[in-house]
């Protein structure tokens, strides 16, 4: 039994040694697919979900990288005015505010890293998709576009 504890300890240390900096807080949860239907085509993203209070508060704080095509989807459970900020977030992000019916309400592009200024939804929204800054402009994502994900119901 003692040998197994030694092996497990060694494996744990090896894991910590190979995890890239800034990714230790990445959830082990499965990524989900989210699509945005734009005027120029369908754009797909692999997203982490933030649904608990702790996940909603932490978001992408302290992350030093976010690959293109990846993001975090914040679920606030109902349509309401939403405000976000960039405190402790070293990456510039695009924040895509989405109504409960899946329609994009507002896109806040290239947010300022580490800023404590609030960024509002500009109207009722159920969710926010955060992606790396510049993505919305690059892919032609704008207000009125439709988001396809099980979280959103069509009206």
Image (spheres, rainbow, N blue to C red):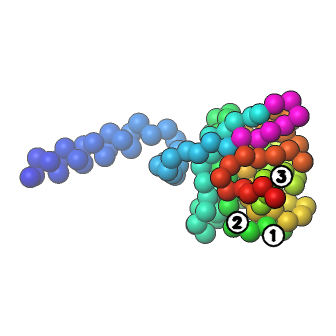
Mark 3 crowdedness (10 Å alpha carbons): few <14, some 14-19, many ≥20: many
Whole-number angstrom distance, CA of label 2 to CA of label 3 = 15 Å
Q: Residue at x 69, y 67 (%)?
A: 77
Whole-number angstrom distance, CA of label 3 to CA of label 1 = 14 Å
Q: What stretch is highlighted in magenta?
A: 35-41
Residue 146 within the magenta-colored segment of the rendering: no
CB atoms of marks 3 and 1 within 8 Å: no
- Residue 50 appears in view: yes
Using residue 15 as the reference point, say whether residue 57 is left or right of it: right
Where does label 2 land, which residue?
Answer: 76
Q: Between 77 and 66, which is closer to the camera in this rendering? A: 77
Q: Which residue is drawn at 86% across and 44% down?
A: 145
x then y, percent, for residue 43: 75, 34
- Residue 64 appears in view: no
Q: Which residue is drawn at 65% across and 52% down?
A: 150
Where does label 1 land, which residue?
Answer: 80
Q: Where 5 sits versus 15, above or below?
A: below
Mark 2 crowdedness (10 Å alpha carbons): few <14, some 14-19, many ≥20: some
Using residue 114 as the reference point, say whether residue 66 is left or right of it: left
Q: What element does badge 1 sit on? A: strand
Please name which of the two marks, 2 or 3, marks the residue nearer to the observer: 3
Whole-number angstrom distance, CA of label 1 to CA of label 2 = 8 Å
Q: What element does badge 2 sit on? A: strand
Which is nearer the N-term, disc 2 or disc 3? 2
Q: Which mark is residue 152?
A: none
Say which quadrant the C terminus sits in: bottom right
Where does label 3 land, which residue?
Answer: 103
Residue found farthest to the front? 155
Q: Between 106 and 8, which is closer to the camera in this rendering? A: 106
Q: What type of secondary structure mainly makes up the magenta span?
A: strand
CB atoms of marks 1 and 2 within 8 Å: yes
x then y, percent, for residue 149: 68, 49
């Amino acid at each position: 039994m003692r040998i197994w504890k030694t092996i497990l300890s060694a494996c744990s240390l090896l894991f910590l040694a190979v995890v890239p900096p800034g990714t230790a807080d990445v959830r082990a949860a499965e990524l989900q697919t989210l699509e945005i239907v734009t005027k120029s085509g369908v754009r797909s993203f692999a997203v982490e979900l933030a649904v608990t209070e702790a996940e909603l508060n932490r978001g992408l704080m302290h992350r030093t990288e976010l690959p293109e095509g990846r993001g975090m989807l914040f679920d606030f459970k109902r349509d309401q005015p939403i405000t976000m900020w960039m405190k402790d977030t070293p990456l510039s992000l695009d924040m895509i505010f989405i109504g409960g019916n899946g329609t994009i309400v507002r896109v806040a592009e290239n947010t300022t890293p580490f800023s404590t200024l609030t960024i509002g939804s500009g109207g009722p929204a159920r969710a926010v998709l955060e992606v790396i800054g510049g993505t919305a402009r690059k892919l032609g994502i704008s207000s009125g576009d439709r988001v396809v994900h099980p979280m959103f119901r069509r009206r």
